[in-house]
Image: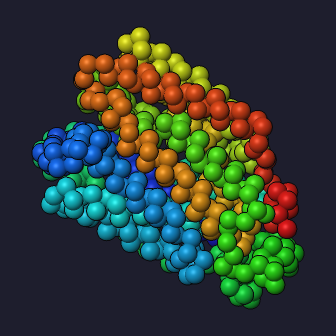
């Protein structure tokens, strides 16, 4: 009974990941429609800012449309630690659910380019916040022996949300809805957002947050309900970690003692995006058209990519607490290098089609089994209780800054799928991503510690933090 309550709480909290994945991937089915719809707006903006370098490029403003949600994620990730510490993880998740709902409705009923960008920005705030608060909440209610699997539920739901977005786009695209097709693609997100908001009322507050707020009695009650093995010992270890007599709950993250987890969070988050994963997720239809697929078949290939992502995430979730975080990252890094190097060669030699699809399936499998499964687990583990929300925010902020940079620049670097030289431009971009993954492999071998099966408070000691 207690295990079921723990699992249910983790699953509900991880539903923020489903909305996270859906919201970030749904743009792939509509981005070329939006480029045509707002072409006049882009030309006007480019004309108005023509003397300011890249601002005079219409492609820049289309990148802005695609990246509008990502700008929100950056702010959402950076700002979410404060309400998470002040009001609690669960209450902050409820606020994020409301933002998801507002964004879905606002995007569907947008009346011009600016209203659409604002609605997507609001959704980005929710995505950024979810990437911080969701992993923290699940890590703080989970026993050490199953923490990897439970936190990885968030990543499972992220990729499930991505697959749902691709399937939804494919189904809506086959219904011949005409000019309102793109509105339905964004609007359907309102249903899971409303369900997430309702379900959150049935899960407990984080016991570690309650301890930080000096509400030990309530924390004890929650830990007993979720089946903690030794409540007294865990409470003592949490109290020692918090150590409020020496460290205030408003303590700054940027202190020398936290340098090691800061660098670990920064590098794993930066490399996550330097793989080019979200260039594929956001521009999958465009990329497959560059490889010679028709628009409809390109959408279907996106569904295949999403399904592969889900299958290998499930595989990683089943072994992450057995093999550990570091081994998964090693396997994933090697897969990245092989697949991205081959994609770069295929585009340069103009040998698209099956080769590109096959390599992208290997790429997405490598991501799902490695970085995708590990990133949110690892960042949620390496910071002490007293600065965990701030540390998670730093890692998520880095992730979304890099995401915005990659996603914003990709359409400018490769151009339209049918443009002359698009294939060679794609080759250069994917060669760069391959080079970054060679650096990630070196980082994993040289710097990344293993955290599997270690209680949160003992990881703090392992990293030399008193």
Residue in front for this viewpoint, 181 or 458: 458
Residue in front for this viewpoint, 50 or 94: 50
Which colour assignment does the render follow? rainbow
Residue drawn at 42 percent across, 36 percent down: 280
Residue 316 occupies which quadrant of the picture?
A: top right
Count of marks overlaid on the render: 0
Residue drawn at 47 percent across, 27 percent down: 430
Residue found at the very far front of the displayed protein? 51
Q: In this view, does 455 lie to the left or right of 372?
A: right
Q: Quadrant of the N terminus?
A: bottom right
Residue 282 occupies which quadrant of the picture?
A: top left
Q: Is residue 163 left or right of residue 227?
A: left
* Residue 3 percent across, percent down from the top left: 70, 66
Kindly tell me whether residue 187 is visible in this rendering.
no
Q: In which quarter of the image is the C terminus?
A: bottom right
Residue drawn at 31 percent across, 19 percent down: 421
* Above or below, 9 relative to 409: below
* Above or below, 411 relative to 136: above
Residue in front for this viewpoint, 333 or 228: 333
* Residue 429 percent across, percent down from the top left: 44, 28
* Above or below, 385 relative to 117: below
* Residue 210 percent across, percent down from the top left: 68, 82
Residue in front for this viewpoint, 232 or 395: 395
* Above or below, 217 relative to 164: below
* Residue 135 percent across, percent down from the top left: 61, 61
Residue 327 occupies which quadrant of the picture?
A: top right
Kindly tell me whether residue 418 is visible in this rendering.
yes
Residue drawn at 52 percent across, 42 percent down: 273
Q: In this view, does 459 lie to the left or right of 50?
A: right
């Amino acid at each position: 009974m207690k295990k079921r309550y723990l699992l249910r709480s983790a699953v509900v909290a991880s539903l923020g990941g489903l909305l996270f994945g859906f919201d970030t991937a749904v743009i792939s089915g509509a981005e070329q429609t939006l480029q045509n719809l707002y072409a006049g707006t882009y030309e006007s903006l480019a004309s108005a800012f023509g003397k300011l370098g890249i601002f005079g490029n219409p492609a820049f403003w289309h990148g802005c449309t695609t990246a509008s949600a990502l700008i929100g994620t950056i702010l959402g990730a950076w700002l979410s630690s404060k309400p998470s510490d002040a009001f609690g993880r669960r209450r902050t998740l409820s606020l994020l659910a409301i933002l998801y709902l507002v964004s879905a409705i606002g995007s569907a009923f947008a009346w011009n380019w600016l209203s659409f960008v604002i609605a997507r920005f609001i959704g980005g705030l929710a995505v950024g916040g979810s990437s911080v608060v969701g992993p923290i909440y699940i890590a703080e209610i989970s026993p050490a022996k199953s923490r990897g699997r439970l936190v990885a539920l968030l990543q499972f739901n992220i990729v499930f949300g991505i697959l749902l977005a691709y399937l939804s786009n494919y189904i809506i695209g086959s219904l011949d809805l005409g000019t309102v097709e793109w509105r339905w693609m964004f609007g359907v997100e309102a249903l899971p957002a409303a369900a997430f908001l309702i379900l959150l009322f049935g899960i407990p507050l984080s016991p570690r947050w309650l301890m930080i707020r000096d509400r030990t009695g309530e924390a004890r009650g929650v830990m007993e309900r979720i089946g903690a093995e030794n409540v007294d010992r865990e409470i003592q270890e949490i109290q020692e970690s918090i150590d409020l007599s020496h460290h205030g709950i408003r303590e700054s993250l940027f202190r020398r003692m936290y340098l090691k987890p800061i660098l670990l969070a920064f590098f794993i988050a930066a490399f996550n995006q330097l793989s080019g994963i979200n260039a594929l997720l956001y521009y999958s239809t465009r990329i497959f058209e560059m490889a010679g697929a028709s628009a409809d078949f390109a959408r279907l290939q996106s569904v295949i990519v999403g399904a592969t992502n889900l299958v290998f995430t499930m595989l990683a979730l089943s072994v992450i607490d057995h093999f550990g975080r570091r081994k998964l990252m090693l396997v994933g890094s090697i897969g990245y290098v092989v697949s991205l190097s081959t994609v770069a060669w295929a585009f340069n030699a103009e040998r698209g089609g099956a080769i590109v699809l096959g390599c992208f399936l290997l790429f997405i499998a490598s991501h799902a089994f490695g970085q995708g499964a590990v990133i949110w687990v690892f960042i949620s583990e390496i910071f002490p209780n007293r600065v965990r929300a701030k540390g998670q925010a730093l890692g998520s902020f880095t992730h979304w800054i890099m995401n915005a940079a990659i996603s914003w620049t990709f359409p400018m670097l490769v151009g339209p799928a049918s443009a002359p030289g698009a294939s060679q431009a794609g080759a250069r971009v994917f060669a760069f991503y391959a080079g970054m993954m060679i650096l990630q492999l070196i980082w994993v071998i040289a710097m990344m510690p293993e955290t599997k099966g270690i209680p949160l408070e003992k990881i703090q000691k392992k990293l030399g933090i008193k």
